[in-house]
Image: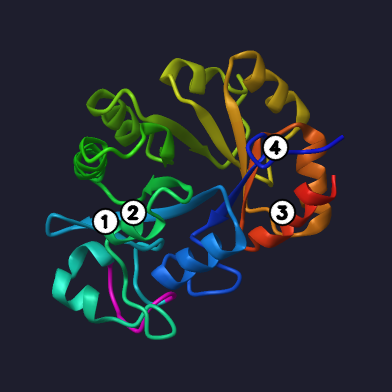
Amino acid sequence: MSIKQADWLCIGHRGAKGYEPENTLRSIRKALALGVSWIEVDVYAVEHELLVIHDARLERTTNGKGYVEQQNLAYLRSLDAGKGEQIPLLSEVVDCINQQAGLNIELKGENTAIPVAKLIQHYLVKGRSADLFLVSSFNHRELALFRQLLPNIKIGALLCGLPIDNAAFAECMGVYSVNMSIEFIDRLFVEDAHQRGLKVFIYTVNHPEDIKRMYQLGVDGVFSDYPDRVLAFIAGE
């Protein structure tokens, strides 16, 4: 059996987090160089701009201190996010990718749905394909708001747990995919999601044995810090 990358998605987690500082343009470029079909990043809204960073606080990934949303934009843009990289704006990430891959935008901070919808709409007007965007969040209220604003853009419900009703909640939300933790996924959930017409993408899948296990479970793709490992598996099957 052969796998095509279009059939089993390799999603670069925060770019290529295993090789370059996460959520930086350097990491995005590395993921593109490795040949990913999709890239995932995280966003917070600060002073009417969308900043690409994962944590609510700055200490782990930058030389700054404090909560992201409590800082001003000038301070945040002055920080070193690793190897001399800035915390990028979401618009810079979209421009960097430039339709070479799809972009999964995770809404991390509060009040991100509206500015993300506005930014995506800006790129749609410029000719960017709606199929190149997927917006996801653990905050399903924020995700529902985004869907009201841009119903033509796919959304993904992030999940870190195993619901009693499996994927029923996601079908009710009208999502395209459930993006679920590798800690909780099982075959029953995958089968239930597929019966409801939903895709299942799993985070974070880094080890070769886990990549193979996720494929055998029938999931539709994986997020990986080391996307080249996933691509090597795809090429070898």
Kindly report the distance in space between the C-alpha atoms of the residues bearing marks 2 and 1: 5 Å
Nearer to me, 117 or 167: 117
Q: Main secondary structure of the magenta part?
A: loop
The spot of residue 167 in percent (x, y) is 58, 22
Q: Residue furthest front?
A: 127
Left or right position of 33 against 91: right
Q: Earlier in the sequence, mark 3 or mark 1?
A: 1
Left or right position of 171 against 153: right
Nearer to me, 108 or 131: 131
Q: Amino acid at mark 2?
A: Val
The magenta region covers 60-67
Kindly report the distance in space between the C-alpha atoms of the residues bearing marks 4 and 1: 33 Å
Secondary structure found at label 1: helix
Residue pictured at 76% horizontal, 56% vertical = 232
Q: Amino acid at mark 1?
A: Ser
Q: Earlier in the sequence, mark 4 or mark 1?
A: 1
Q: Is residue 28 above or below residue 117?
A: below
Secondary structure found at label 2: helix
Q: Amino acid at mark 3?
A: Val
The residue singled out by tag 4 in the image is 185
The residue singled out by tag 1 in the image is 91
Secondary structure found at label 3: helix
The residue singled out by tag 2 in the image is 94
Q: Amino acid at mark 4?
A: Ile
